């Protein structure tokens, strides 16, 4: 076996360590780079004495406790809603013909960048937005946009933020759950429970869910951490006075008064602590729930036919899907609208002018987005394939602990370490360097590429390789001629996932790129603070189109593969 | 109660898997169904207990006593099934797996008593608190049978349940399963490709024949 790995063994064997180092170094260094300023040390602006002053400034800010509660509330509520919707859809529809339809609608929803979704949703639910237009004046009697609304600009409870996050996280959790369900014969367990007299929903809750949750624990954590610390979505659709903690930190970092960076760093650290605390509390609640429901699992209660549960789940799932689709549609319509007065349901005049007028900057942003996306995806694919190949040749799966490390970039709030990374980059004169941009994108692209490629890679029947080897092919030839072609569609899908993740990155692009690289995402988010819906529509549509094309391409390749 | 199949046939796309089958199983009767792999015998069992996978389609009728089963969801059929694998749920202890089979509405003491009796019958006394993974193959198979029986089925289907046991265990497991089925008067349908299984069952042996006109 040792000699069989041949000369490529040396390169490969370093891959896992290299990948982990690439992911962990910036996080550790970045956290340190945020920690020091939070305690008053930031030589770049002449602050060199350690003190608690940044914390005092932060704690003295009037809206802080409100911001803390708002952050926790929106993050936990959105994650809980997304998880409940996911589980309801699975419990109600697993093993029904609806599952195939749900599966099919996932790819476009996953591809839609969260910034675009938030923008589209904001257009949809605003008092002058799409929903009000569709319902006015015949149902509402409004001839002009109403002044207030629960989802209006005030929205002190962050309800629109919760809605946007729920819409974005449900497809992700569904996707990860379906991957989890494929890892053990869940169908057989369900069949046993059904023939023992259990209704479909009870069978799912009592037999499948306790086995499924451990498999989606990390994705749920990632969703919760994302919801607590997301910047772009909160900027677009979150409350502004006070905003969530992440947005507050970002405001400090962007403040023309450089000394505002010190309390901002403290706020970023506070957010990290809050995220850690929320993850702990969440896990504690899950453990408690598991313990309390243990007796219920085998108490013999069979449940009913589940028709009501199925329709409730499908109803809310359809509502969510409908909102997401209307959001996307609204962006498209706005980008072509010339004259669209309230309360008309459609524009009365259409135009290509917004697209034509933006052609040059759109081309630049698309070029940057494509360049960084393709590069990050390519490097991530190489790293991940090397790791998986090494794992297989070593015949040792990635341990639970390494999986945690891999997930770390998705668990630590971006704003808390990217500021530190920026400080370090600036210190080395690398701020705004293309390689720095690539590296920070890799932090988020690599975990997702790994997650989508690991299962198919591990499921690959190694006897194909073995029989090719006995036919006299070397390991390299076997890899390129046998394994890669057979795993081609999985690689294509993983590439589409990685590319989509890179396209959606806002904070990494702004911080590591030092604002020098305009991508479709940074442009769309920058426009969001203005009120030009037509322009926002153009960039958000373009931002959605790129990952969508990626997925379409990948699925086309996969289908061609399938026919073979 | 008799388990009666009338003109039963299963199709994949438009192709019939076997010639239409008529069968009448009296309480306590054990009928063995043999045939090469891929002839549709396991698929037939999954249809009888209501878990036929989507691409398949079935015609003909199933009745259990006076009840028509076709169209009913699996949980309303009262047809128990044992598979090749024991399929004990790994997140529950052995005792909890057995309790999972018990009907609802029994007092806590009654549930405990019945589980203890079942553990004893399966020769698993003292192993109730263990995880299923710690049991041997034979122990798991016996626990799976008892879990099925605790749900009080009115008929029993056996989908090659002995094929994964070592030969020494197989004989004991056969008589364990068959004696329980007879004792409770369950009409029992056994699917296998091991002639020794059929001998041990002692009942009539049928083989699924190819569809006549090859359609």
Image (spheres, coloured by chain):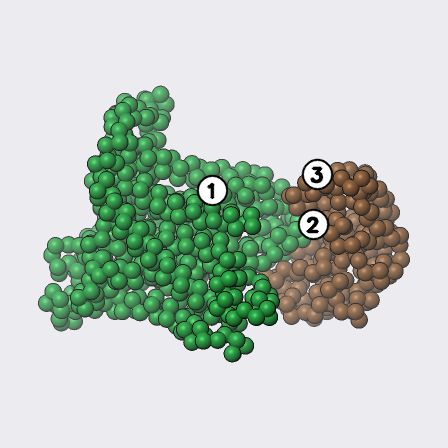
Q: Nearer the viewer, mark 2 or mark 1?
A: 1
Element type at mark 2: helix
**Occupied quadrant, residue A509:** bottom left
Q: Are marks 3 and 1 on the same chain?
A: no
Residue located beneath label 2 in the image:
A195
**Chain A tint as drawn:** green
Q: CA distance from mark 2 to mark 3?
A: 28 Å
Residue located beneath label 3 in the image:
B14
What residue sits 46% from the left and 56% below the top?
A491
In primary-sequence order, the first of circles 2 and 1 is: 1
Q: Nearer the viewer, mark 3 or mark 1?
A: 3
Residue A128 spot, x, y in % from top left: 28, 31
Q: Pointer 1: residues within 10 angstroms few (<14), some, or many (20+)?
A: few
What residue sits 84% from the left and 60% below the top?
B195
Q: CA distance from mark 3 to mark 1?
A: 30 Å
Residue located beneath label 1 in the image:
A105
Left/right of residue B152 with respect to residue A304 in the rendered view:
right
Instruction: Spot the brown chain and give its letter.
Output: B
Q: Are marks 2 and 1 on the same chain?
A: yes
- Residue A255 vs residue A160, the one in the foreground: A255
- Circles 2 and 1: CB atoms closer than 8 Å: no
């Amino acid at each position: 076996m040792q000699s069989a790995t041949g000369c490529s063994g040396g390169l490969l064997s370093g891959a896992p360590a290299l990948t982990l180092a690439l992911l962990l170094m910036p996080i550790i260094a970045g956290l340190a780079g945020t920690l020091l300023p939070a305690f008053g040390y930031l030589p770049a602006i002449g602050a060199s004495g350690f003190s608690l002053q940044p914390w005092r400034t932060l704690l003295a800010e009037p809206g802080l406790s409100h911001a803390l509660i708002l952050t926790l509330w929106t993050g936990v509520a959105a994650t809980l809603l997304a998880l409940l919707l996911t589980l309801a859809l699975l419990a109600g529809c697993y093993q029904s013909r609806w599952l195939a339809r749900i599966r099919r609608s996932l790819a476009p929803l996953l591809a839609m960048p969260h910034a675009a979704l938030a923008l589209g949703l904001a257009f949809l639910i605003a008092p002058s937005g799409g929903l009000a237009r569709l319902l006015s004046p015949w149902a509402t009697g409004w001839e002009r946009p109403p002044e207030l609304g629960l989802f209006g600009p005030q929205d002190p409870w962050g309800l629109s933020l919760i809605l946007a996050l729920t819409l974005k996280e449900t497809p992700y959790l569904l996707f990860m759950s379906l991957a989890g369900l494929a890892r053990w014969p869940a169908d057989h367990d369900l069949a046993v429970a059904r023939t023992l007299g259990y209704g479909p929903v009870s069978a799912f809750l009592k037999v499948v869910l306790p086995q499924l949750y451990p498999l989606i624990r990390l994705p749920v954590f990632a969703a919760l951490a994302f919801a607590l610390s997301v910047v772009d979505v909160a900027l677009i659709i979150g409350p502004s006075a006070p905003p969530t903690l992440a947005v507050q930190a970002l405001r400090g970092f962007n403040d023309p008064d450089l000394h505002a960076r010190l309390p901002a760093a403290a706020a970023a650290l506070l957010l990290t602590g809050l995220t850690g605390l929320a993850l702990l509390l969440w896990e504690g609640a899950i453990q408690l729930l598991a313990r309390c429901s243990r007796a219920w699992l085998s108490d013999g209660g069979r449940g009913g036919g589940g028709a009501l549960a199925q329709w409730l789940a499908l109803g809310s799932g359809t509502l969510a899907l409908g909102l997401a689709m209307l959001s996307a549609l609204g962006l498209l319509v706005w980008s072509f609208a010339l004259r669209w007065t309230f309360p008309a349901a459609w524009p009365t005049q259409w135009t290509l002018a917004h697209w034509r007028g933006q052609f040059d900057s759109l081309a630049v942003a698309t070029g940057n987005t494509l360049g960084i996306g393709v590069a990050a995806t390519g490097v991530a694919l190489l790293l991940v394939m090397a790791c998986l190949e090494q794992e297989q040749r070593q015949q040792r799966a990635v341990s639970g602990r390494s999986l945690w490390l891999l997930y770390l970039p998705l668990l630590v709030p971006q704003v808390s370490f990217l500021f530190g990374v920026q400080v370090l980059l600036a210190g080395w004169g690398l701020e705004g360097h293309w390689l720095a941009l690539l590296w920070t994108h890799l932090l988020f692209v690599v975990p997702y590429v790994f997650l989508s490629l690991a299962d198919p890679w591990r499921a690959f029947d190694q006897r194909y390789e073995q029989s090719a080897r006995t036919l006299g092919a070397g390991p390299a030839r076997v890899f390129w001629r046998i394994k890669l072609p057979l795993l081609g569609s999985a690689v294509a899908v993983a590439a589409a996932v990685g590319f989509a993740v890179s396209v959606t990155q806002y904070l990494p692009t702004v911080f590591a790129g030092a604002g020098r690289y305009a991508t479709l995402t940074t442009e769309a988010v920058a426009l969001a603070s203005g009120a030009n819906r037509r322009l926002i529509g153009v960039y958000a549509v373009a931002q959605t189109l790129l990952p969508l094309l990626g997925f379409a391409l990948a699925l086309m390749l996969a289908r061609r593969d399938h026919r073979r | 109660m008799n388990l009666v199949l009338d003109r039963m046939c299963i199709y994949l796309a438009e192709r019939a898997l076997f010639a239409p089958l008529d069968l009448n199983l009296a309480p306590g009767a054990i009928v063995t169904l043999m045939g090469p792999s891929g002839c549709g015998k396991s698929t037939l069992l999954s249809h009888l207990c209501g878990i036929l996978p989507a691409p398949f389609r079935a015609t003909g009728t199933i009745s259990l006593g006076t009840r028509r089963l076709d169209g009913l969801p699996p949980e309303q059929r009262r047809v128990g099934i044992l598979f090749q694998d024991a399929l004990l749920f790994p997140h529950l202890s052995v005792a909890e797996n057995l309790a999972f089979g018990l009907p609802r509405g029994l007092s806590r003491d009654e549930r405990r008593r019945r589980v203890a009796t079942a553990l004893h019958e399966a020769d698993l006394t003292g192993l109730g608190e263990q995880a299923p993974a710690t049991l041997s193959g034979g122990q798991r198979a016996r626990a799976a049978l008892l879990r099925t029986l605790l749900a009080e089925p009115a008929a029993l289907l056996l989908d090659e349940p002995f094929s994964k046991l070592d030969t020494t265990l197989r004989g004991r497991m056969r008589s364990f399963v068959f004696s329980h089925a007879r004792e409770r008067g369950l009409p029992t349908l056994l699917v296998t490709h091991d002639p020794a299984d059929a001998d041990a069952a002692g009942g009539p042996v049928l083989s699924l024949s190819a569809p006549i006109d090859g359609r």
